[in-house]
Amino acid sequence: MKVKFPDVLKNNMYAELAKRNLKRQSVRTILAAIGIIIGVIAISSMGILGNSLKLSITDSFADIGDKLVVSPAPGEDSITDKQIDQMQKIGKIESIIPVASSGELVEYRNGGNTVQSFVAVYNIKRDDLEKLVELEEGRYFKPGSTDCVVGSSVASNLELSPGQKIEIDDSKLRVVGILKERGFGFDINTDSGVFTSSEMYDKLYPDADEGYDQAIVIVKDIDEIDAVSDEIEERLNKKDEMVTVFATNLITESLDDVFRAISLFLMGIGSISLLVAAVSILNVMLMSTMERTKEIGIMKAVGASRKDILKIFMLEALFLGVIASTAGAILTIGGSYLVMLLLVRDSSYLFTFSSMFYIIEGFFFGIATSLVGGMYPAWKASRMKPLDALRYE
Amino acid sequence: MQHPIVQLQDVTRVYTLGKNKIYALNGVSLSIKKGDFVTIMGSSGSGKSTLLNMIGCLDLPTSGKVKVNNVDLSKLDDDGLTAIRRNNIGFIFQQFNLIPTLTALENVEIPMIFNGASTEKRRKKALEVLKKADLPLEFADHKPNEMSGGQQQRVAIARALANDPPILLADEPTGNLDTKTGHNIMELLKELNGAGTTVIVVTHDPKLEDYSHTTISLQDGEVLE
């Protein structure tokens, strides 16, 4: 069967017939529509739920995975300057940031109270720090000084502002800057870090090992990340396993997989309600064909072919599907907006392309459901023998 | 010589009711000339409606041959029969059988839609045949339940005329109408016959014989000579 759309539009009487038939049984039409509306809402809001969950979690990660983290292999103490030099020779690398760190309990005196917090103290070059994170306020530390900058959660936990002092192992460090929130990083956690000059770091930890705890490698092109990773392994782990290389994109990739599975699962639940809607449409349309048996007989008697009857009934299903799916899509947008505003106080995840995609998907699923539900009754109507149909009372 | 517009050769139609076979038509042969006005008379159960359904391509014979406009119906499938019906036959029913959701004008347009006519052409033709059927134009946008029986039958006649069929088939066209309205409807059919359309009326009412040229009487599925 071929339904040419321009043809249908030209002979808009088919559409008119379908419209009036839907109106004639308005209560039943509305009930059938509600089925689809619920289905569309279920399927698209489940999709959006999964998507927002994913977005909110991936947003809390600092990077999209354009970095490699090189750390000492088990049994090795540190990354040496020599190893850094070897890595430097590899092309395709934007920069290498060597980092040394120590865990520390810091104290801060606020009036009479002493506030304590566990932080990581980092030895990192000022320029390198700038590559990783921006300043919220103040300035970066000067080389050789007793200045330090602190991460955003350190600042908020200890209620710090530039100009105040913190105490580490009886040494006093002046806070000169506070970093912007960066989120959880797979390289270093700047939010809970204290950064100071290497002179100050050496003074704080005179017994620390030579070398670095890790090196962050930023690649020029994210597509080259695997090649660079292989080359580092090749150069540094020639004889023995000296370093381990970890690509941060591995994490985001597997997270993507997990959330895709969650979204699919949630939408699967949503689609059950569409299945129910399909059955209810099947029921409604079957009743309607039964009721209109005589009318179908008349139309056949005055020259309607099977195709014509099929067209009229399928158009009815199409209209029902389009109207109900549109209502469902609008309600989903409105409803999710309200829910997000009330619960998360942030609706920005709703208006992303990926969330909108789920609404469009729900919309088309709704129409498809309606068409599938209408198919059998339409087929049945088109097959009625005109004589039997005319006699039907 | 011109071939007859309707021709039946030894037509039998058998219905099976449980174990019993009922011969609705039993070896009926007849032919109807183009431009004739025929009344098929018979009491209830005589097979006259079955005969009408055969001519109207709504039913096929168990055996025998039916030819409409020289086309053998037995060789056609459902859509083929529909096409013959659409182009050759206008139906007029006892219960008018208008589509309740459509206005008078739209009801008349229906057969033309299935024939693929354009909107303007349809509208123009519908008004033309409504005028021919003597329906006052102010009723054109009325739904069937807003009209009297006589008016509804006029709409039905207009609908039957929409595709300019050579044959009009009327099944008890006056059965649901009072005597005066019935008379007017028959006069209208006579007028249409005068313009060249073959009219076949099925009835049990002997009064309708007066309007026609030829009468065929049926009894127990057989033609009475």
Image: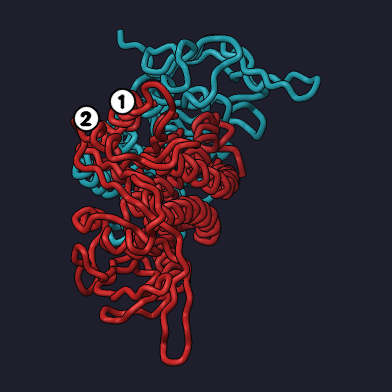
Chain colours: A red, B cyan
Q: Residue furthest toward the top?
A: B1
Location of residue A164 with respect to B181 vertically, above or below: below
- The x and y percentages for residue B101 are 43, 54
Residue found 39% across the figure and 48% down from its top: A209
Q: Is residue A163 visible?
A: yes
Cα separation between marks 1 and 2: 9 Å
Residue type at mark 2: give it: Ile
Identify the residue position indicated by label 2 in the image: A90
Disc 2: CA contacts within 10 A as few (<14), some (14-19) or many (>=20): few
| Dot 1 amino acid type | Arg
Q: Horizontal and vertical percent for residue A217?
A: 28, 41
| Marked residue nearer the N-terminal end (1 or 2) | 2
Q: Is residue B93 visible?
A: no
Give the chain letter at badge 2. Answer: A
Mark on residue A235? 1
Residue positioned 38% across, 26% down in the render: A237
Q: Residue furthest front?
A: A207
Q: Mark 1 and mark 2 in contact? Answer it, CB < 8 Å.
A: yes
